[in-house]
Image (cartoon, rainbow, N blue to C red):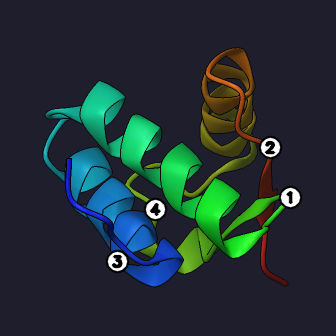
Amino acid sequence: MSDLTLAEATENIYTSLRNDNAELEVHVAALKAAMAREGAKEAVFEPSKLAQNNRQGRKLMQSYFRKKGVTVVFAE
């Protein structure tokens, strides 16, 4: 696995979500590694870039990522 930046890993998550969650597990692991390298406690996502930008979709995403050890917050 390459050493992606947090921004690159986040973009890969957006792409995966738009592509019916293709390789989401791999991208979440890369995101978690990037967060550890950069000292980030939370992954911040732009709601407008999400495939399911509604409350249910955001809560589902938070729940899934929490199970993988990643805290997700959404930019205002």
Q: Nearer the viewer, residue 50 or 16?
A: 16
Question: Which quarter of the picture shows residue 53?
Answer: bottom right
Furthest residue to the top?
67
Q: Secondary structure at mark 2?
A: loop
- Location of the C terminus (image quadrant): bottom right
Residue 42 at x, y percent in the picture:
81, 59
> Dots 3 and 2: beta carbons under 8 Å?
no
Is residue 21 rendered to the left or right of residue 36? left
Q: Which secondary structure, mark 4? A: loop
Residues under labels 2 and 4: Cα distance?
16 Å
The amino acid type of the residue labelled 3 equals: Glu
> Label 3's element?
helix
**In the depicted view, which residue is nearer to us: 55 or 28?**
28
Instruction: Look at mark 3 in the image and give the residue it sits on.
Output: 8
Residue 62 rendering spot, x and y as whole percentages: 72, 36
The CA distance from mark 3 to mark 4 is 16 Å
